[in-house]
Amino acid sequence: MTERQMLVARPGAPPPPVDPVPVDPAAPDGPDTDTPPVGTLSPPVPAATVARLLRDYRTGPLLAVEPVAEGLLNRGYRVSTAGGRYFLKCYVEPATAAPATIAAQHRATAQLAALGLPVPPPLPDRAGRTVTQRDGRRFALYPWVTGSHRTGAELDLTQCTELGALLGRLHGALAQVCAPVVQPLAVPTADPADTAALIGELRRLAARHHPYGAFDRLAERRLAERLDLLAAHRHRRPADTAVGRSGWVHGDFHRLNLLYQGRRVAAVLDWDRLRVRPRAEEAVRAATLVFHHPVGGELDLARVRRYARGYRQAAGAGPAELRLAVHRVWWERLNDFWMLRWRYQRADPRADPLFPAAAAQTVWWCQEYEQVLDAFVN
């Protein structure tokens, strides 16, 4: 079982409302494919840098620092000091490391924690700042507590309902603490003609990849298969105006960003993708990431059904809103290749392990569309 460490701090009076952060509502949910490779490919943070950084905090002297499991956007470290243990986050992805973006995230998480939600806000330094800059990179410090990630299969049906309800409550709370959202008249959907052109480019790159191996053969097969699926379903493209309520969302709600203690979610982690999006679409995306088979990609529809019921009740989202969201996320997945773009356009293989199950899920979803829809809306 993978472990992550966090503690939900309880601040005093909540800070001012979160300022709006410009967000492209059509931006992909995967990391930005147009920026250079970052995250774990960035240089490690030297212990000397950590020691200097901690002088700004009331932690006591540094005793030890070691890297912990990392995502695609940032680096993380377990820091042991004379005053206790902490989690140090290093922001390195350009799209999420801008000062205004980090400040908005920190204000939001502080207010969510003040409302009693399991969201860990960063610790302030001696000057009251939650962001520290050293050697050209930005950092935030959090308390440390042991917890573990859970797969969807490890959750019983009651926990599935509770997880959906938690996401619904988070969406409601974000609407309270973040800047008001003007509902868009339309949110663009992927153009299958553009997707077909991208598939052609990726097929050429996969065929020429060196060394050519089993992954490249799989990529070529899945890309050809996707062309056939697009031809069969292109008439089902959602209208740009067929969209549910937009609001502030976590932006990356999946099992590796959920820390469990016993039966309960103790912390919702990594708010780097905090943004304005159609809210129910996040609920659908999260279910596909939490309740999928790790090899075949199929969804556990019994658990999805209980999760969706919990979300609908807590968020006040009706079946019609979930129906729109399911269709739009299905179409998004049918047209999405961010993992292969990382491999072939950026020469960055870190997302390769995600591709086989994700590609298989898209095929399965096309075959079982009505059953998936029923699980979310009934």
Image (cartoon, helix red, strand yellow):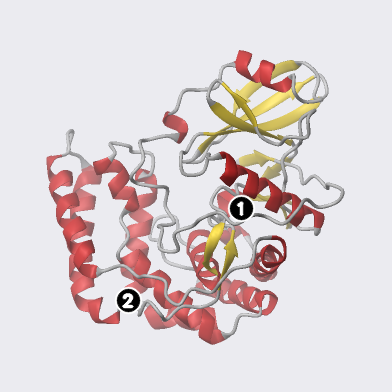
Depicted 50 relative to depicted 229: above or below: above
Q: Give me the residue at 35% from left, 36% from top.
A: 36
> In this figure, which residue is indicated by the disc labeled 1?
150
Look at the numbered disc 1 and give the secondary structure of its residue.
loop
In the image shown, does 135 or 267 lie closer to the viewer? Answer: 135
Q: Position of residue 100 (x, y in %)?
A: 58, 44
Tell me residue 375's x, y (percent): 51, 79
Q: Nearer the viewer, residue 76 or 25?
A: 25
x then y, percent, for residue 313:
68, 79
**Which residue is at the front of the view, 289 or 176?**
176
Residue placed farthest to the top in the image?
A: 48
Q: How crowded is mark 2: few (under 14 residues within 10 Å), some or many (20 or more)?
A: few
Label 2: which secondary element: helix
Residue 317, image x, y percentages: 61, 80
Q: Please report the residue visible at 57 percent of the width from the left and 46 percent of the height from the top.
A: 101
For disc 1, the neighbor class at 10 Å (few under 14, some 14 to 19, many from 20) is many
